[in-house]
Amino acid sequence: MSYRLGIDVGGTFTDLALFDEKQGTLNVFKIASTLHDPSEAILSGIKKILKRFSIRPRELSYLGHGTTVATNSVIENRGAKTGLITTKGFRDLLEIARQKRPSLYDYFADKPPDLVPRTLRKEITERVSARGEVIVQLDTRELKKIISEFKKNGVEAVAVCLIHSYLYPEHEKKCAEFAGTALPHAFICASCDVLPEFREYERMSTTTMNASLGPVIARYLERFSEEVKKMGIKTRPYITQSSGGIMSIETVQKLPIRTIFSGPSAGVTGACFIASKSGCNNIITFDMGGTSCDVSLVKNGKPLVSTERTVGGHPVKTPMIDIHTIGAGGGSIAWIDEGGLCKVGPRSAGASPGPVAYGKGGDDVTVTDANLVLQRLNPHHLLGGDMKIDARSAYQAIEVKIASVLKMDVIKAAEGIIRIVNANMERAIQVVSVEQGFDPRDFVLMSFGGAGPLHSGEISKELGIKKVLVPRTPGNFCAWGLLIADVKMEFAHTHLADAIPENIDILHNVNTDLETQAVQWFEQEKIPPDTQEIMRFLDMRYSGQDYELSIPIPNKNMDETVLQEVIENFHRSHKRNYGYCIHDRPVQAVTFRLTAVGRSSGNTEGTRFPEERSVPLKPVSERAVYFTGQGFLQCPIFHRDALFPKDRFTGPAVVEQFDSTVLVLPDQEVSVDELGNIIITNTIAGGAQK
Amino acid sequence: MKPPSIDPITVEVIGNALLATAESMGATLIKSAFSPNIKERRDCSTALFDSCGVTIAQAEHIPLHLGSLIGVVNTILQQYSTEEIMEGDVFVANDPYVGGGTHLPDVTVISPFFYEGTLTAFAGNIAHHSDIGGRVPGGIAGDSRSIYEEGIRIPPLRIIEKGKLREDVLNFIILNCHIPDQRRLDFQGQFATNQVALRRLTEICDTYGRQVFLSSLEELLHYGERKLRAGVAKVPDGEYSFTDYLDDDGISREKIPIAVTVRVRGENLEVDFTGSGDQVEGAVNVVESALSATVFYAIKAVIDPGIPPNGGFHRAVKIVAPTGTIVNPSEPAAVGARTDTCQHICGAIFGAFSKALPDTIIAGSNDASTSIVLSGINQWRENRRYIYVEALGGGMGARPHKDGLNGVQVHITNTSNLPVESLETEYPLLVERYELIDGSGGAGRFRGGMGIRRSLRLLSREADFSSHGDRHTIPPWGLFGGQEGRPGKFILNPGTAGERIIPSKTSALKLRENDLFVAETPGGGGYGNPSERDPQLVLRDYLEGRILEKEVEAIYKVVLNPTKKKVDLEATAKMRKENR
């Protein structure tokens, strides 16, 4: 019982990472994803990896799974048939949204498709005031009628979202209970359980989406766990969530919405782990794959978190790592617009047809093609020789489609494509750093994803970032991150109260209620006491303001001293985020938050290195690689497997490995740390690309 | 046209960096402002200008705000010589006649950007302050008769001098407002916003050098101009005219023509407002900067939404507006409610283009900016004075090949609503309904978007009400056989003995405890003949309650079977044939 297995499903590949806890060895494995049914690739992947390493299924002590089933089902509009019950007068909230049109200038742009058709958005007589008092009693006779209509229409899921339910959940609970009894096979959820926070539209959208995902996720997970069990795997699978932790299948089935942004989150979890082991607590993660680039900021070992984002045009409020995603990757397409300027992305050639040089029928110039022309990528083969490359066709495509139109040299055009995609990604990094009040120069850039290490050298230099860290398996990093993820659950409750000593009791009680919920959850998830951890936060604002800042609060009973400390922290945080604070203005407590964590037992740093290297470091070959401002320079090519802790060399150089390629610029220095991470240091300050 | 003096890659990179700067200014402003009107409703904008005041980048917020932003930089440049403008200075202005503004609540804050000691660009932001003093809180009552009723007039003023805030100037401004402390905090947010821009511009110049930066700006402007001209060249040459009408000016009950003639010759475009009504006594006059911003919005939307929002394309559009008319009034005409007119100007320009580009133009939209202001004392909030401002969306006109969008802001505005739960927590109001209005979209082969109903009950003893809006008597027009949308309406205490219709442009109305105020906004006009609409879509709209039962046969010529769940195809075909 000593193997941990992580499985991450991407758009192109399903990645597996297997860690042998006794031997301390890590193995990675890739299999083509099966988009029509992701579990197909997962199951055959598990079978293959177990067979290859002769492991019996019951020897797996942990199984972590990252899935995008929820995300895809929203984007592709394949949610379950859902009915909505809401307060009388508000059935169109979902459709009116925030009354903004989707595009400022393009009046042909459409709003996202309705999550629930108007015929299934039902109003019920009831009303709670902003002070939490019932003004109009719930009419249960109407409820009966609504449910029977749902039944007639074959509704598979019901969402209940009533005005001010975060203050008085009883009406919602009654509706949900009633619906649950009358429709025993439907998935039922109430907004007071999904998101007990104020702002009705966002809460309704989140709750409705949770409902429409319920049956979809249940079907997927039931099948998945059944198949896993059939294989003889005894451990219960865990699923990644948007906030970076993992959760049990039972929890996911209740709150599928918590997985909606989980795609890139395991990578950030992995990055935090590596960062803390390597002694750098402040990092920016830079994960560039085939179609998208995900960036996030980790401060003091903890990722910045966020609570709201849109998916398929619908807002979702759920705890999540604040990951900023843009359409920039190896497959991003370069094109010339009507005004004669070169653009890159957001459209991607994806895995199929892929870049021109892959010879799979792609004829649009991609970032990968540009990297090949500049010989930054191996111009003959990729994936450790598994894939043949036709660099010549990439050259011709850039010549015809870009260079001749711009009346530029082909090499210059290829360089230009890289500069544009880099600039887009630099902007993304600024969004997570500068716009949040952080200076990127104070951070280490952690670079992963298949294409990340190829671009991070130039990007770090441009942004003035001194150090870049490339982990050992950058291309399989998310699957690896799954191996070390904590079990995690977030609780929240909105209760508006002035942050004053007179209200200590109220503040204390809300806080204690959340703690009770957390204790129950620990029991239910069977989390050993020594791995339990609780973190508390309070969303606060100045009175009269209507946006809050989340402030960490200490893990002790709320008293006057604690409250004073929290208020001080709020002022400081306001100053950092918004540039000012107002000491003499009353502060309000709005939403209490609690994160309960069961710490992972995984010790999964990667294959240990032998004590001594047997052969001295030597490049495997040499090739001319293009560098901005310097043209083609003859470069040593190293193989990643041959690198050893304490190795050092200076750029220009290229490091090739199965799942990625690392580009080292002429004035960058490389060292390999104890864990086998590549550390690239900029010796000359930024602003190279004039 | 000058050949590009700099490679197109660098231009693209710098252009993106400038847009990113404008966008992150916008994010900062929304984050750092204090009042709900800016933070939650996002009634604010940001932009960058070159050292001559030409727009080089504008964030996608409220198109109309561009007017004030351009206007203010220009008036600063007229009033101060470049030697007088110092590094660290910040200017503020709002006056439509001498300060480049479009109405008084929109206060603009402009910072010069110096690089290596030389004036290189300007950064600016604008925020709609929910109160700027004046006769009625909010300053946007549609029935004001002169600019002096609408609030404090601020000509271009240096509010920060070489980095030092002039407290005396700020105190003077906020003393003239109804809720001074909120104004101070919003101003702080506006100042912080420009700081972000100055930092980013410095970084860009550090990377590329001042000369490359300046050449890129020039090329970006050329690019904007080229894109517009390329788009105009595709429009058939000719003169296209359209006249739309405002219901009234809030004082008299006479309709006011907004006449526009669009002249296209090759790649040249002229927009001429000769024939529009004289300036009016009420607050719906549109000053020059507001007119330009409105025309620029409409042209970009019609010709090519992908044109970069910069001064390059602006210079390729010629605007003619006779002095003394509603689209170019003389001082001291009131302008607080100019948005309603600007919406009609867009509508009229769209209408004119519908004759040249029938396949790309939408029917008449809600084309108003239904705005209400309630103010009073909130007994649940330490008896603090409050001012609640809301601008409601409505129906978008039906589009060629598609229905219009339901319940959205159109044209030159795009503000958010205030969440019901947020509103009820902050103000002594209860929202009883917030919904789309059944049957409000104009019938057509493609249906106009539905208008919005918002019902507010007053929970405190009394409140002052003011408003502006339009299309309460003259409905949004249909196109090519499409029918008109349903007009808007304000009703006080509907269904009671005290039921009363409230005019769209109102002030000095006192609401009493338990009064119910209902705002209904206009639906969009339809596109094409309703009897050509797909019968299945008619059925769907009927089942979803979007159209009224009586419309099904009478207007759409669709017959449903007795269960009313299916279309009777045969009977429908017969009815449609008979009506052809």
Image (spheres, coloured by chain):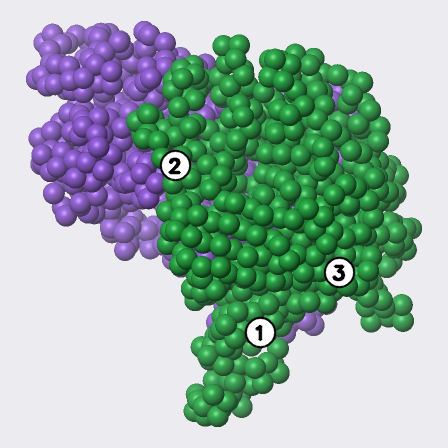
Chain identifier of the residue bearing label 2 in the image: B
User: Dot 3, how many residues are within 10 Å of its Cα: few (below 14), some (14-19), or many (20+)?
Assistant: many
Mark 1 and mark 3: Cα distance apart in space = 22 Å
In the drawing, what numbered circle is on residue B223? 2
Q: What residue type is labelled 1?
A: Gln
Which circle, 1 or 3, is nearer the viewer?
Answer: 3
Q: Which chain is green?
A: B
B542 up-or-down from A131: above or below: below
Residue B61 is drawn in which quadrant?
Answer: top right
Q: Earlier in the sequence, mark 1 or mark 2?
A: 2
In the drawing, what numbered circle is on residue B483? 1
Q: Which chain is purple?
A: A
Q: Are marks 2 and 3 on the same chain?
A: yes
Instruction: Tell me the residue at 24%/34% (across/down).
Output: A406
Determine whether the residue tagged by mark 3 lies in a helix, strand or loop.
loop
In the image, B402 versus A592, the foreground residue is B402
